[in-house]
Image (cartoon, rainbow, N blue to C red):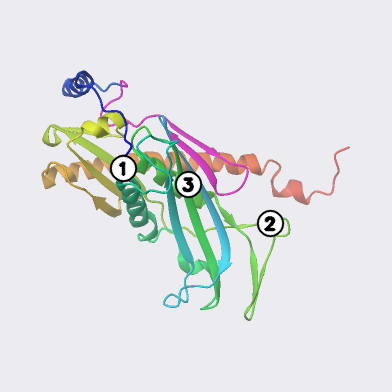
Amino acid sequence: MPREADLSLNEQSFIVQALREGVRIDDRDYRDHRKFKLEFGDEYGVVDVSLGKTRVVARVSSEVTTPFPDRKFEGIFNISTELSPMASPAFEANRPTITETLLSRLLEKTVRRSGALDTESLCLVAGAKCFAIRADLHVLVHDGNILDTACIALVTALQHFRRPDVTVEGEDVTVWDVREREPIKLSMLHFPFCVSLSYFENGDIVLVDATSAEERLREGELVLSMNKFGELCQMAKYGGVPVDAVMMLGWTKMALEKVRVIDRFVQERLADDEKRRNVGGLMAELSAENAR
């Protein structure tokens, strides 16, 4: 099975000793994220997110389909993740790894099971027709903290996406082209984000946004998913050295501060993209004057 090249003993001891002295190898503070970069595609729902060197692209699409028999009044929402060898030598095409399984599971808990997307608003005709929303996540570069980057990409893409407008008459559904009617935003109830904390020295050293090298040397990881209001969506700790519960409460407060920073950054970028797409505004579109 392919894997990434192991760190040498000198590299391992250097990184750990630097952390003990309060220094990270990229000169960040323990609680600092790497530089965010968020770009939008020409189509609605296409988002490219970079966190340091880690890069994830998300694309949201929709189609009209039949709802599940046991959920006649709800639409369908699916999340698909792909980790290809292009992102890291440790990944193989068409062979899901433990990393990909955990990534899919945590994104499901954070976004879908927390009710971030209002699936009832996707229902068109009860038991007959509804919108099926699909989010595809592609990891292009892996340099640590895939989960946080993928979560930002997913939540931002859902906010950026516009579904086609529809007209329902009885059981007849007419789906309008985006050139005929303005597409409609998805109904989002809240915006959850993940914050992954890596700890060393039995929890005495806690890092936010660990790099790939730091992830391979950490003693354990705690993933917290919450929105800006402090509502905890999920908490995950898969193995590692046990930590004190009181210490974890302090980490939760720190994660809330990071979530609010991420949420503010995403909303600013969405507002900038909205202005870019709507240069003249509605009044310019309704104007009868022609540019001569």
* Residue type indicated by callout 2: Val
Q: Amino acid at mark 1?
A: Val
Residue 129 versus residue 208 in the image, above or below: below
Q: Quadrant of residue 2?
A: top left
Q: Which residue is mark 3?
A: 156
Drawn side of residue 163 relative to residue 241, left or right: right
In space, the residues marked 2 and 1 are separated at their CA atoms by 36 Å
Residue, disc 1: 195
- The kind of secondary structure the magenta stretch mainly shows is loop
Magenta segment, which residues?
26-50
Tag 3: residue type?
A: Thr
Q: Residues within 10 Å of mark 1 (few under 14, many from 20)?
A: many
Residue at mark 2 to residue at mark 3: CA–CA distance: 21 Å
| Residue 68 is inside the magenta segment | no
Q: Which residue is mark 2?
A: 178
Residue at the far bottom in the pictured view: 170
Q: Front-most of 179 and 190?
A: 179
Spot occupied by residue 12 in the image (x, y as percentages of width and height): 20, 23
Task: Assign the C terminus to one quadrant of the image.
Answer: top right
